[in-house]
Amino acid sequence: MTNENFVSLRDLTLAYDKTVAVDRLDLDIRKGELIALLGPSGCGKTTTMRAIAGLLTPRSGSVHIDGRDVTRLPPSRREVGLVFQSYALFPHLSVFENVAFGLRLRREPDLDAKVMAGLETVGLTDFAKRQPADLSGGQQQRVSLARSLVMHPKVLLLDEPLSNLDARLRLEMRTELQRVQRETGITMVFVTHDQSEALALADRIVLMRNGAIEQAGTAEEIYNAPVSGFAADFMGFETILPNEAGGGLAWRPGAVVLGSGPHHGEIRGASFAGERREYVLESALGTIKADVPVSLPRYEIGQTIAFDLPRETAVELARLD
Ligand SMILES: Nc1ncnc2c1ncn2[C@@H]1O[C@H](COP(=O)(O)OP(=O)(O)OP(=O)(O)O)[C@@H](O)[C@H]1O
């Protein structure tokens, strides 16, 4: 084991009865890395995470954590922490007691100091005596994070940890998670179906599709150079067309030129989005989505206009599908 494969999934096949949810997956996670498992509903993100946690025994393949084969070990012996979207706090226990719970079971010394250090990491020292019901969703999520962190897990697994929070809190918790990760240096794997969340948070994104890895790379790599139509679509390229080489070309809405060019399309949708106006066009090439600065001339629904899909603003895709 090196720091490069602190967590190592090898040839992992995970199934529920007859449904193969994850098919021969290989993934190495570095020590201290923040990884996002990203993908549409049903692609196998949660299943992969459950296998790391030990909540699901693989049909074949192995899971190693910190050099140890944990494939057959129960969750309690893997030294992993879990944070779910439902905070799963004990409602009748104070914040302090919720965080202390696992430490008490382990009969750890210096309980008070450890719990308070955990609460300090998530900025909740003043809330130790409160009941979970008297906290906001974001604060409850922090308690849940502190409860896991005080156990010093080797890996912290987070399943859609921000999806129950409103938009403002979600942004706040993103920053919070990044800070905690930087300060503690803990290896984190979080599951999300939200590409903007993955882009904002993760050191590396693992984009999954139908139980396999479609593409893995840094946010910039996947955002700027998706390998397939699927990856491009997930990263916000709205117009994807075949190229001559059997692959594809993809344009973001802002890369489409409206008002001039060799193609024509009818405006079917127009909406104001602050700095930009978004249009949907029907054309011989298919549906085109474009957005342009509001300072440019405005088009009306039903109008037919010229447009261009410049080759130089397109991203080349190795595969169209
Ligand atoms: N308990 C289960 N029993 C049977 N099939 C399941 C079970 N849990 C998941 N599956 C199936 O396994 C596949 C992967 O599911 P998984 O929950 O890992 O996807 P996901 O990417 O996490 O999706 P979501 O974002 O909706 O949670 C899906 O086809 C799903 O229907």
Image (tube, rainbow, N blue to C red):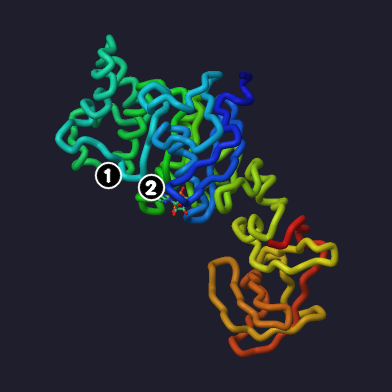
Residue shown at the point (46%, 38%) measured from the top left = 49
Instruction: Looking at this view, name the residue that lies furthest to the front.
Output: 18
Q: Position of residue 308 (x, y in %)?
A: 77, 74
Q: Position of residue 71 (x, y in %)?
A: 48, 27
**Marking on residue 240:** none
Vertical arrangement, residue 105 with respect to residue 134, above or below = above
Residue shown at the point (71%, 64%) measured from the top left = 251
Alpha carbon distance from label 2 to label 1: 10 Å
Residue 183 in sight here:
no
Q: Amino acid at mark 2?
A: Leu
User: Which quarter of the rendered picture does the C terminus lie within?
Assistant: bottom right
Q: Which residue is mark 1?
A: 136
Q: Amino acid at mark 1?
A: Ser
Cβ of disc 2 within 8 Å of ligand 1? no
Residue 34: quarter of image: top right
In the rendered structure, the answer to whether residue 15 lies left or right of residue 207 reads left
